[in-house]
Amino acid sequence: MIISARGLRKDFTVHRKVGRFRRERTVVSAVDGVDLTVERGEMVGYIGPNGAGKSTTLKMLTGVLSPSGGEVQVCGLEPVAKRTTLAKRIGVVFGQRSQLWWDLPLGESFSLLRHIYRVPETDHTARLKQCTELLALDEFIHTPVRQLSLGQRMRGELTAALLHGPEVLFLDEPTIGLDVLSKQAVRTFLSELDTRGDTTVVLTTHDLADIEKLCRRLVVIDHGKVVHDGTVDELHSRYRSRRTIVADLELPWPDGLTLPGAVVTAVEAEGRRVTLTLDGTAAGEVVAALAKAVPLRDLSVQEPDIEDVIARLYRDDN
Amino acid sequence: MAHAQVALVAAGFRRYSTYRQATVAGAFTNTVFGFLRCYILLSVAATAGGSVAGYDGPQLVSYVWIGQGVLAVVNAWVMLDLAERVRTGDVVADLLRPIDPLWTYLCTDLGRSGFAMLTRFVGPVLVGALAFGLYVPANPLTYLLAPLSILFAVVVGFACRYLIGLSAFWTLDIRGTSMLWVFLSGFAGGLYFPLAILPEWLKTTLWVATPFPALMQAPLDVLVERGGVPNMLLVCASQATWCAVTLFACKRVQARAMRKLVLQGG
Ligand SMILES: Nc1ncnc2c1ncn2[C@@H]1O[C@H](COP(=O)(O)OP(=O)(O)OP(=O)(O)O)[C@@H](O)[C@H]1O
Ligand SMILES: [Mg+2]
């Protein structure tokens, strides 16, 4: 296992002004006993509402923030104590920050990183070539970083984080503020990375489409505590999220009609559109029964919505 | 130096070379102030019988014009972006590299000073030489000691500003400290007037107990061969000591800061 955290915690002491002279100390438990193990090659989505403690966890895992308690090892090293050693073996992108040199062209940042990480020339060239193709860096590799658009910069950041061939990649909101195309580019890039299989990825995001497309495993944190650790499907079954069938009918839905294996949850459009929620029965059986009962014009089967189930999880936790 | 350090120095040089207008504007301003300061000091010297605090005419001209150049090379009154990066949390990126941030910042600043040497030093000094005529050092040793002395000045100036930057880990707002620093480094560093005009006790205290004279007065005194070879060697030795002391302080303070590592922002 390449990442292991046990009872990881971080308390921040915040001073708050009360009245004119008094200051009140409050302790915020940003991370409150997180247990997390990640195997080599896994891609894990680490999500949670704003202020849940995601970034704080990532900072502790990468060695730039000392934990208040608990044990943590990344690549077999204690992150804070072995920060510079660990730095060679991990790649990090904090979406709201930059690791590139603001005044230099993107390409110069890359060659500077090659020297800093002591990457052999051939490895560097090969990795850069791969990133250039997948992320279309050509168009702006000679542009100073300060002139790049957010999406262009983010592609640069991803490349910068990968040029030294890290074993673990930590991504804190890498798709924040990107347009659809840039998001897709980043996702394709990451799934490509995943299929090659040797890089472990921990991904934080508020865009659940990132998770659906990329991560089999989902770790949800709220108020500093892990509230779910498993697959997206497991989360659906935990909340009994169901698939639904929406059917457009030739004739209005007969009042009081029921079908085995499904519950009618809505009848709209003067009875000509009906929504059925499946109770776990195969959709095929229900569709067959439905077609026998009423003439159909159109039909769609909808998967349970990840947004809904995550929203329920966040709400439940409050 | 290792590859990484060389690359960082080169990058520092490149970064500043992208700001052409600022470079020209800076050199121009330094030149204008050079004329002002030069006329003032020369007129003071004229009323005082040709010299000020033991500096004769050409030495005063050098003190002013080379001072205007060294000012830009040492850059002591412009804070490093370290403090700002601590305040915003961007320092994370510096800490996530497999290299001590102290060396990253030092190399970058050396690169910057190298660029300043070629532009903002050479420009005003050339103007001064053409308009007034500079003091020409007689001893060949001076041509060896002077660049060394300027290098020491850059390193001491860097280390002091790095320490101020590090203080942002404790008190996020460093405006007060940096204002005090800007004032002291100018006043006690020999930028506004040669330190030699101060009373003996104050002068000695500054040279012995503070790093300020190492920033400006030291390289300027070496360049005009003040006090002959023994004094020049003494000045360089004291600068070297201040380099060691301030860099060591940076190391220690940084280690402390790392131990309490609290970074700002999400
Ligand atoms: N340096 C700090 N000082 C005090 N409190 C902090 C500090 N950093 C974070 N916190 C607090 O810790 C909690 C967790 O913050 P964190 O940045 O980890 O959240 P997050 O899950 O990344 O949220 P977001 O989705 O908004 O990025 C928040 O309540 C935040 O206010
Ligand atoms: Mg965050």
Image (tube, grey):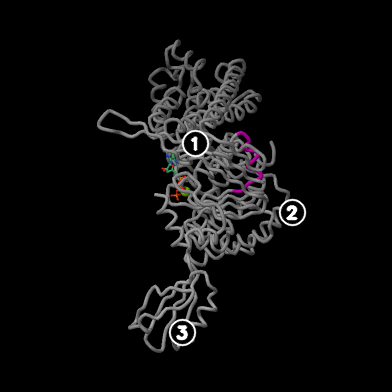
Mark 1: amino acid: Ala
- Mark 1 and mark 3 on one chain: no
Q: Secondary structure at mark 1?
A: helix
State whether residue B201 is above or below residue A244.
Answer: above
- The reply to whether the magenta stretch includes residue A83 is yes
Q: Is residue B51 magenta?
A: no
- Sequence-first disc among 3 and 2: 2
Mark 2, ligand 2, within 8 Å: the answer is no
Q: Is residue A102 visible?
A: no
Along the line of sight, the residue nearer the viewer: B72 or A99: A99
Callout 2: helix, strand or loop?
A: helix
Q: Separation of disc 3 and disc 2 at Cα?
A: 57 Å
Give the farthest residue toward the top.
B201
Whole-angstrom CA distance, mark 1 to mark 3, is 76 Å
**The residue marked by circle 2 belongs to what chain?**
A
Front residue of this view, candidates B95 and B219: B95
Quadrant housing residue B248: top right
Which residue is identified by label 3? A298
What amino acid is at disc 2?
Thr
Kindly identify the residue that appears in the image at 59 percent across and 64 percent down: A188
Q: Are marks 3 and 2 on the same chain?
A: yes
Q: Give me the chain letter of mark 3.
A: A
Count neighbours of disc 2 (C-alpha within 10 A) and say few if under 14, some if 14 to 19, many if 20 or more. Answer: few
Disc sitting over residue A71 in the figure: none
Q: Chain of mark 1?
A: B
Residue A6: x and y, percent? Answer: 58, 40
What residue is disc 2 on?
A: A122
Residue assigned mark 1: B72
